[in-house]
Image (tube, rainbow, N blue to C red):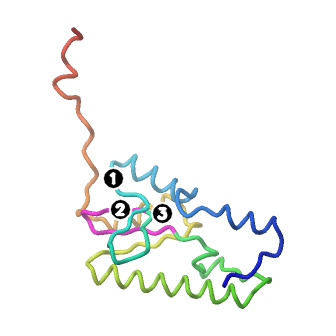
Amino acid sequence: MRPAAVNEQKRQSMARQRSRDTGPELAIRTRLHALGYRYRVDHRPLPAVRTRGDLVFTRARLVVFVDGCFWHQCPQHRTSPRNNSAWWAAKLAANVERDRATDQRLADAGFRVVRIWEHESPDEAVAMIVRALGATAAPDPPRRASPADALPPP
């Protein structure tokens, strides 16, 4: 069971943590979309897997996770809360363990997984995703005007 928050301000701060549409995620999505790539957002790639990918390229079978440094224990930026430290240590270790299990389940189902830390540059993250996609998911071609657009108004 979750321990009580130290104070109301801390509880509200933690409650405001976004699970989707975070700043780093939006920066990556904007750049990919501008390059012509299309993907699903906050999508469950497999019905049997509880985890939802931040970006899922269904045809290319690529799942992208943009992981927060605190929640997923980034090697460079991990921190350990001082209050309720035992509970938090178990919680964060379970998050990392679930990430590895999810990666394995997706790989077993034929998906490739790209994990990006929130502190990574959006341009570097996009480059990693584009490399992972390779030729399997070329950007959509620019949309052309349809013949109906060329007709004069009635």
Q: Classify mark 2: helix, strand or loop.
A: helix
* Front residue of 89 and 74: 89
- Amino acid carrying mark 2 in the image: Val
Q: Specify the farthest residue to the top.
A: 154
* Front residue of 1 and 97: 1
Residue 83 locus on image (x, y percent): 80, 83
- Residue 45 in the magenta stretch? The answer is no
Confirm or deny contact between disc 1 and disc 2 (CB under 8 A). Answer: yes
- Amino acid carrying mark 1 in the image: Tyr
How far is disc 1 from disc 2 in space, using C-alphas? Answer: 9 Å
Quadrant of the rendered structure where residue 147 is? Answer: top left
Q: Residue at x 50, y 87 (%)?
A: 97
Q: Classify mark 1: helix, strand or loop.
A: loop
Residue 110 locus on image (x, y percent): 26, 78
Residue 51 vs 89, above or below: the answer is above
Residues in magenta? 55-66
- Residue 63 in the magenta stretch? The answer is yes
How far is disc 3 from disc 1 in space, using C-alphas? Answer: 16 Å
Confirm or deny contact between disc 3 and disc 1 (CB under 8 A). Answer: no
Q: Residue at x 31, y 81 (%)?
A: 107
Residue 154 vs 26, above or below: the answer is above
- Amino acid carrying mark 3 in the image: Glu
Q: Which residue matches tag 3? A: 124
Residue 44 locus on image (x, y percent): 37, 68
**Residues packed near mark 2 inside 10 Å, few (<14), some (14 to 19) or many (20 plus):** some
**Residues packed near mark 1 inside 10 Å, few (<14), some (14 to 19) or many (20 plus):** some
In the rendered structure, find residue 37 and report the number of the disc placed on it: 1
Which of marks 1 and 3 precedes in the sequence? 1
Q: Which residue matches tag 2? A: 130
| Quadrant of the image containing the C terminus | top left
Residue 54 relative to residue 60: left or right: right
